[in-house]
Image: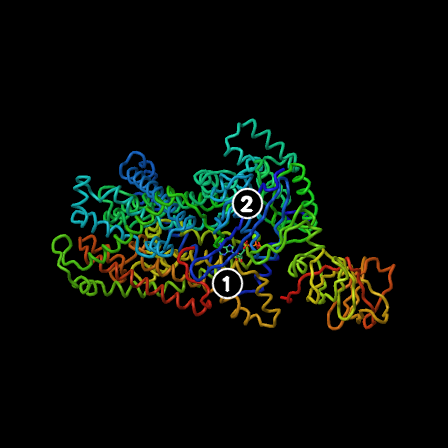
Amino acid sequence: MRPDYLVLRSLVKVFGTGENTFTAVDNVNVEVQEGELVTLLGPSGCGKTTTLRMISGFEIPTSGEIFIDGEDVSTTPPNQRPTTMVFQNYALFPHLTVFENIAYGLKIRRDSKENIRKTAEKIMLLVGLEGLAERSPAQLSGGQQQRVSLARSLVMEPKVLLLDEPLSNLDAKLRVSTRLEIRKLQQRVGITSVYVTHDQEEAMTLSDRVVIMHQGKIMQIGTPQAIYAKPANRFVADFIGKANFLEGRIGSLASRNEIVLDIMGQKFQVLVQPDSFSEGARVLLVVRPESVNLEPKKPDTLTGTVQEAVYLGSQMVYEVDVAKNIITVEVANPQEHLVFKAGEEVTISFQGKSLHILPYEEAH
Amino acid sequence: MTGSNRKRQEIIGNLRLLWKEPLLLVSIIAIFYFLMIFVLFPLFMVFKTSLIVDKQFDLSNYLAIFSKKYYFQPFINSMILGVLAATAGTILGFVFAYAITRTPLPFKRFFRMTATFPIISPPFVIALAAILLFGRAGSLTPYISRIIGEYSIYGLGGLVLVETIAYGPIAFLVLYGVLQAIDPALEEAAMDLGASRARVFATVTLPLAVPGIASAWLLVFIESMADFGNPMVLSGNFRVLSVQAFLQITGMYDLSRGSTLAILLLVPTITAFFIQKYWVARKSYVTVTGQPTGATIKRLEWYIKLPTYAACILFTGIVFLFYGMLIWGSFQTLWGVDATLTLHNYVEMFQVGKDYIIDSLALSTLATPITGILGMFIAFLVIRKKFIGRATMEFVSMLTFAVPGTVVGIGYILAFNQRSALFPFVLTGTAWIITTLLIFRNMPVGIRSGIAALQQIDPSIEEASTDLGASSNKTFRKITLPMIAPAFFSGLAFSFVKAMTAISAIIFVVSGRWNLITVAILGFVDNSQYAQAAAMSLLLIVIVLIALSIIQILVGRIGKGARTVSIVN
Ligand SMILES: Nc1ncnc2c1ncn2[C@@H]1O[C@H](COP(=O)(O)OP(=O)(O)OP(=O)(O)O)[C@@H](O)[C@H]1O
Ligand SMILES: [Mg+2]
């Protein structure tokens, strides 16, 4: 298992010429391990597709290099790269049958007829297309078309499989079941994959690691857990899940790895990485809504006024005004908790370990 | 309820609806009557006349087909011409369309405009330019003779050249639409799976374009087989059906033979039309929507760039050469004899041709709005109304499109040179015969663009306007009209161009009193007055361009400038 099976080094893509240039991908560095599935996640227009198309060879990087399995493929034309792509709209050849679509690449590679038939049949069984070999793509449902597209790419046994929002044309239910199938298939075949999506749930459930992109730059790379629990900056915290932001100040250092935080006059003792903060620094605190506790108002605590209380069955969602900061609170299992009404005064609290501390940055 | 019962109920329901809108009913009946008189009746007369020899029913014309050189040779010649021109034109059109949709060719707009220019000019001016360039006293003839020896531009070779230039642009437009509609992701997918550029072309691009190629081929085949102007000028001893039919009727006064030749011309063109419309169109994988699709391909190999770019430059060069030659020729004192530059030709053209020019302008201006409104109205009926015979109405009104002008022209003189039970007026020799012919011959284009425009308007758009408080009158003015206006005006533009440049059918119905500019040009060519012919052709081209600009401006005003007039749909 080489840890640097696919390497993107300082990738830059600038579109346009002269005055009118636009940097779609800005100094992207990623290393993908063999057999790993990495998603590129980010808002629309952040450069995900462009990055993927540079890996597949359809866009030529303005600068930077791409290595696959140790080999520099930066200048290799797309038809000679060991990658295959699952297109967003599937791009199935409408004049060929399902079988011919799947066999297309093998034929180009001049496999023997017998071998083509065997391999194609095996892959069709694998993705659940048995019996549909002679259909034309127009006679398939969206989900089936998606599977043909996947099979057509997988059958080539590429070193890297690329998928550009492969589920975006499916309806919500099918999207959930298909993404599980894709994940199982990917793990069974053990194929190194780069998956583009702007759906964070999809990214979280599918990936070994997630690359968060914003305006062409990488914001953070990490496992889904790490990205959710320890976002690297305000953008990531905001983009992944719901987050409350609070301003704070490092009051004093209790020891090398324990600090006292000052949040709106209240003190919190928090364990941190040794020597990561200096006394008096301004910081930004990230608290997830489910980590906040509500109690009836008590003296000498952080207090606020409930502005809105919404009952959602499985949980209660509150918006609490704490000195003009709106804090969202989610309480699971409302039956087992006190329920507050709008206008009530409450005390909010959280445990030190559910606080994530970032260097201070302005909201954007 | 049984199926047939339900059907009957539906018909009765529709009839009741019609009954409630008497104006609509009257218009539908009137349109059917006009279509019968001005489309079907002339065709019927041609057929009938071909079966009558010496006032007796006689099959001898048809029995003689295979024995007589009269019929058989022109038939074969026309077919050969059609096949060769269609093949050359389609190849040319494909290369051009490929270059424009799939390569980073610079100056695409320029290439596109030049390549489509022959469509708005009268087709036979290309034959005229060919004579000026390659004829007996042609400018390039000495150089070419030195290379290939003695040759004659008159005959099959010259005709194929000229028809290819004249109608290749039609193939280009069809294939441009088709190639543009093929999703580039398909080609990328193929390449992604390991196919080289050549392989992608052979296994994806070409197969997907095949129905389009067939369409383009059939259209050029129809046009060049039915063409009259170019072969009239350039066919020499190579006899083709359209010219032979004309000569039989105006030269030998043999209506029966002329009609038989016309029928022989009709059979292959109409067959090709039906193959194109009902078979090829159905096999298509791509729907041409006019929506351009994404990226063009980067990293193009030189072996693709070089030949395609060369072909584009060569063809645009030829177009410039031919039309440039017309300008050059129009200033020569006496073509081939005295090359002193002079304006005399223009003076003479105006003296001799003034009446022709006025007639052409007057009759085209009269026919154009009628064509446009009638076309739009029929489109409206066909798309938005339900009535018995709706499909028949669409079919018959499109029919004239597939019928060669020669056949229509012969039909008109046969049908309207006497009163008949159906139509109690004699039209021969009047302005009306020319006008009606122009109207009914050019109407299919108006109908087609009207249908396209109306189909695009989702009824919910109109509903949305009403929903927001607009009266239905206001909705029509503010929403529907601006949306169909561009199609309406491009229909108008097209029928005006067609009316001004028509020759094949018109030449049968002109008279001493009413004559047209195209016929005058042909007359000049007949007298070997090439310089005057060139001058008058240029004038015609200028008139057409001016008219197109005016319509373009009108569209800009009404259609809010968002869309431009497209001459060909
Ligand atoms: N060929 C091009 N020329 C100019 N700009 C381009 C081109 N292709 C993409 N861009 C721009 O680059 C940016 C990134 O595009 P890209 O397609 O990579 O976004 P994306 O992250 O895939 O977004 P989405 O989620 O909407 O698919 C966008 O702002 C886009 O407008
Ligand atoms: Mg994208």
Amino acid identity at mark 1:
Val
Query: Looking at the image, can residue B47 be seen?
Result: no
**In what element is the residue under mark 1?**
helix
The x and y percentages for residue B216 are: 40, 46
Marks 2 and 1, how far apart at CA: 51 Å
User: Which residue position is annotated with label 1?
Assistant: B26
User: Which residue position is annotated with label 2?
Assistant: A91
* Residue in front for this viewpoint, B208 or B543: B208
* Residue in front for this viewpoint, B541 or A67: A67
The x and y percentages for residue A83 are: 55, 41
Look at the picture and state if B307 lies above or below A354.
above
- Horizontally, is B251 left or right of A159 in the view? left
In which quadrant of the rendered image does the N terminus of chain A lie? top right
| Chain of the residue where label 1 is placed in the rendered structure | B
The x and y percentages for residue B137 are: 16, 49
Q: Residues within 10 Å of mark 2 (few under 14, many from 20)?
A: many
Q: Residues within 10 Å of mark 1 (few under 14, many from 20)?
A: few
- Horizontally, is B315 left or right of B369 in the view? left
Q: How is the image coloured?
A: rainbow
Quarter of the rendering containing residue B493: bottom left
- Horizontally, is A24 left or right of A144 in the view? left
**In what element is the residue under mark 2?**
loop
The x and y percentages for residue B94 are: 39, 45
| Chain of the residue where label 2 is placed in the rendered structure | A
- Horizontally, is A158 left or right of B78 in the view? right
